Image (cartoon, rainbow, N blue to C red):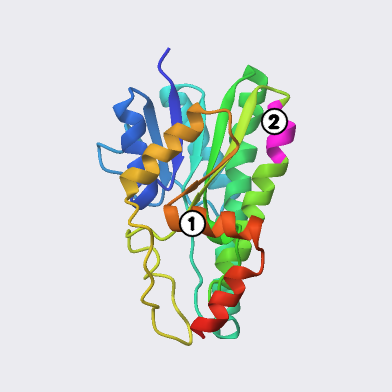
Amino acid sequence: MTTHAIVVGGSSGLGAAIGEALRARGVVVSNLSRRAAASNAADASFPCDVTRDADVQRAVSECAQRHGPCDVVVYASGAPAMGRTLDVPTEAARACFEVNVWGFDRVVRATLPGMVQRGHGAVLLVSSIVALRAVPHETYYAASKAAAARYAGCLAHEARKAGVHVKSLHVGLVETGFFQRGGWWGMQVPNAKGSGVTPQDVAHEALALLDSGDDERIVGWKEKVIALGDRIAPTLYDRLLRLRG
C-alpha cells in the first residue's frame, strides 16, 4: 500500500520542498492550502483555509476519498507578524495565532483520530528556533510557535500510546521570502542571516526526523549553537543581544 501524506501549506516554501521530497520517495502527497501546489510537490491540491473548521474538515475528507487515509501529516502552514511589539496591529497578531496554533489544532483534530484508530501514523510540525529562544521583534510569531511546539510535545505523550508519533522540526531563517513578508511594523526589515540552510535541506531533515525515534530536531548550525548555549549558559545569548543593541 502506498503511503499517503497530507502537507498543509505545500504550495510554496518549506511545505513545497517537503512535499517534493516525500514524492521522490514514492509517497502520495495531498496539498492543503489556499493555492495549488506544483505537480512536483503534490499529487493533488485541495483548497483549504486553516482558519476555518469546515474548510479543514472538508479538505481532509476529500483527500482521503481520493487517496485513502493519511499516514503522515506535515503542518508547514504559517503566518508571520513581525516588528516592534506594540506597533503590530492586534488583528495581525491574532491572525498569527489563528494560523500557527489553532490551524494546527484544526488539522490535528481532523486527522489524528483516524491514525489512532488505525494504530499508526505521524504528525510533523514545522516549527522555528524562536519557539525555543526569545528574540526581539518577533513577539507574536515566536509566542505562537512556542505554543504550537508545546502543544505538539504534550500531544506526543498521549499519541505515542496509540502508535502515533508527533514531532517538531525547529528551523531558523531560510531564504523563502517568508521572513521579508513579516510586516515589520514600526521598523525596517532586519538584515538577518541564517545558517545557509535551503528548503531542500529542511526537507531532508524533515524526512530524517520522520524516520527517527526522536520527537524534535533543530535545523542549522547557528540554531544548534543557540540551543546548546541555552542549555549550558542560559543568559549568554541575551547578553549578546544587548551588546548588539
The residue under label 1 is 223
Q: Which one is nearer the viewer's eye here, 140 or 237?
A: 237
Given the image, on which type of amino acid does mark 2 rest? Ala
- Res 45 visible: no
Secondary-structure class at tag 1? helix
| C-beta proximity under 8 Å, tags 1 and 2 | no
Q: Position of residue 228 (x, y in %)?
A: 58, 54
| Residue name at image x 25 percent, y 36 percent | 40
Q: Which one is nearer the viewer's eye here, 202 or 234?
A: 234
Q: Which residues are magenta?
A: 155-160
Residue 157 shown left or right of residue 142 in the figure = right
Q: Position of residue 204 (x, y in %)?
A: 37, 38
Which circle's residue, 1 or 2, is located before the other in the chain? 2
Q: Quadrant of the N terminus?
A: top left
Q: Residues within 10 Å of mark 2 (few under 14, many from 20)?
A: many
| Residue name at image x 38 percent, y 62 percent | 194
Choose top left, top right, bottom left or bottom right for residue 143. Answer: bottom right
| Residue name at image x 66 percent, y 69 percent | 235
Q: Mark number for residue 159?
A: 2
Toward the front, the furthest residue is 232
Given the image, on which type of amino acid does mark 1 rest? Glu
Q: Position of residue 63 (x, y in %)?
A: 45, 31
